[in-house]
């Protein structure tokens, strides 16, 4: 929301309502957790072979000292508490706090009234939990087992995230519990027109289904299909059938999730791909990328590019820059979490011309029209923050972020991303 805010009914002290009050960012903003950081926390805990614990606040908003009509009062109070107790708040992720004592460290990540914590020293973790429960009315949930709809199984050196219960609820909600399973979430070479000739579907139920699928945060292999279907404002029966196909895929794979294991190396590595002019509606390309810590997948994305690329090289170059920006953000957070990346982050791309373009400062006919912001990657490569590396298309896991692939290729990349039972 912008600084001007929006006209809304606003409840004031004395239970009165005032119309057309403009809200500012100070009144409405409160930080929320990002799944990329949660995945990173899980990957680091698996690497350290330590457990992640969970705490729940009984009445978060009642603990805040109300100085203004705002829901962020609780966040302000808990932030003050952490700072007073010697924690450093991440400058890149405001919900992330780290405390260091000698060579040991404790990491805490907040999500409204939930928090997860883990560290290298068991006594340090227990002391933190005891102190914060004295300050606030909290419940020690013990080992993190269920967080934001995600089921968590922990053993030393291995953490498994899945959403079996959530998937079962979806199958029941949309009357698909008896459906026949299918091997992939999207048919090969399938394209969707915004306005096709098929009968219109119930847009309300369609949006409910797509909105529910967006919260599947343990299945990077469905990201492209969900992203593609979410862009259709007036769905037809063809679109609804494609969305239900994802549920059919889940029917046979509901126990699957992401596995995080201890690695011999813990380097941040990226994979990037694009589908040039893949949209039959406006000829825009799709950008897709994946980041792993070692081989543990922590961040992924699939989205349509903002403008039409004139070549496959340009489409690849744009997504390389987008992924480089994500890499910088992840690097900063890893540094805050005591896993600083001392070497350039390698980004794998299957387009050699795009790789050359990231290293060549000369503006020529193939790049002079590209928006200035997309040349940011050249600076990162020059400063050795990012290193571009070629990868064969058949070995590129980001391929499933931009297009439907064959069953063999789909299963191969699932295995590489450690999507398993």
Image: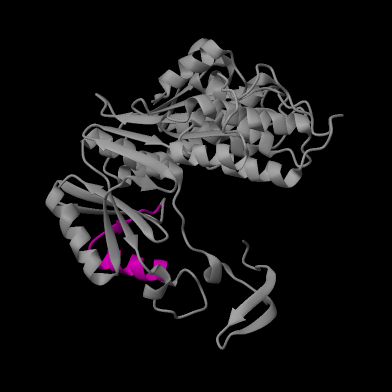
Residue at horizontal 70 percent and vertical 38 percent from the top? 231
Q: Residue 203, position in %: x, y? A: 75, 44
| Dominant SS in magenta | helix
**Of 190 and 277, which appears nearest the observer?**
190
Residue at horizontal 32 percent and vertical 36 percent from the top? 43
Q: Determine whether, in the image, residue 230 is placed left or right of residue 156.
A: right
Q: Residue 409, position in %: x, y? A: 52, 13
User: Most extreme residue toward the right, as rendered?
Assistant: 197
Residue 82 lies in the magenta stretch: yes
**Of 203 and 312, which appears nearest the observer?**
203
Q: Is residue 360 visible?
A: no
Residue 7 lies in the magenta stretch: no
Seen in the picture, residue 29 relative to 33 is either above or below; the reply is below
**Of 379 and 117, which appears nearest the observer?**
117
Quadrant in which the N terminus appears: bottom right
Seen in the picture, residue 180 relative to 228 is either above or below; the reply is above
Q: Residue 269, position in %: x, y? A: 40, 27
Residue at horizontal 24 percent and vertical 24 percent from the top? 264
Q: Residue 9, position in %: x, y? A: 67, 75
Seen in the picture, residue 129 relative to 149 is either above or below; the reply is below
User: Most extreme residue toward the bottom, as rendered?
Assistant: 14
Q: Residue 417 sits in which quadrant?
A: top left
What span is in magenta?
Answer: 74-91
Q: Is residue 311 visible?
A: yes
């Amino acid at each position: 929301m912008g600084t001007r805010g929006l006209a809304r009914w606003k409840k004031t002290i004395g239970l009165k309502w005032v119309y057309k009050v403009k809200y500012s960012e100070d009144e409405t903003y409160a930080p929320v957790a990002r799944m990329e950081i949660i995945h990173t926390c899980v990957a680091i805990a698996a690497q350290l072979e330590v457990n992640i614990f969970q705490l729940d606040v009984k009445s978060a908003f009642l603990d805040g000292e109300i100085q203004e009509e705002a829901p962020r009062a609780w966040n302000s109070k808990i932030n003050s508490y952490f700072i007073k107790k010697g924690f450093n708040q991440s400058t890149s992720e405001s919900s992330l706090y780290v405390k260091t004592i000698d060579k040991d460290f404790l990491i805490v990540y907040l999500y409204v009234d939930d928090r997860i914590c883990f560290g290298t020293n068991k006594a340090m973790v227990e002391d933190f939990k005891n102190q914060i429960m004295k300050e606030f009315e909290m419940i020690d949930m013990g080992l993190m087992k269920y967080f934001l709809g995600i089921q968590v199984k922990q053993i030393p050196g291995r953490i498994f995230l899945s959403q079996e219960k959530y998937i079962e609820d979806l199958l029941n909600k949309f009357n698909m519990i008896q459906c026949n399973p299918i091997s992939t979430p999207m048919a090969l070479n399938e394209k969707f027109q915004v306005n096709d000739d098929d009968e219109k579907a119930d847009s309300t139920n369609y949006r409910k289904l797509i909105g529910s699928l967006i919260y599947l945060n343990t299945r990077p292999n469905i990201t492209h299909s969900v992203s593609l279907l979410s862009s259709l404002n007036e769905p037809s029966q063809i679109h609804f059938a494609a969305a239900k196909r994802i549920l059919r895929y889940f029917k046979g794979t509901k126990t699957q999730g992401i596995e995080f294991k201890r690695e011999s190396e813990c380097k941040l590595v990226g994979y990037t791909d694009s589908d040039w002019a893949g949209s039959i509606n406006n000829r825009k390309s799709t950008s897709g990328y994946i980041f792993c810590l070692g081989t543990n997948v922590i961040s992924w994305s699939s989205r349509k590019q903002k403008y039409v690329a004139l070549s496959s090289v340009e489409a690849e170059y744009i997504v390389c820059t987008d992924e480089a920006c994500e890499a910088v953000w992840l690097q900063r957070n890893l540094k805050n979490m005591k896993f600083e990346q001392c070497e350039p982050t390698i980004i794998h791309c299957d387009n050699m011309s795009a790789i050359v373009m990231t290293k060549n400062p000369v503006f020529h006919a193939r790049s002079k029209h590209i928006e200035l912001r997309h040349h940011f990657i050249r600076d990162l490569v020059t400063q050795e923050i990012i290193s571009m590396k070629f990868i064969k298309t058949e070995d590129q896991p980001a391929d499933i972020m931009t297009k439907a692939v064959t069953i063999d290729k789909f299963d191969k990349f699932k295995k590489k991303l450690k999507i398993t039972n």
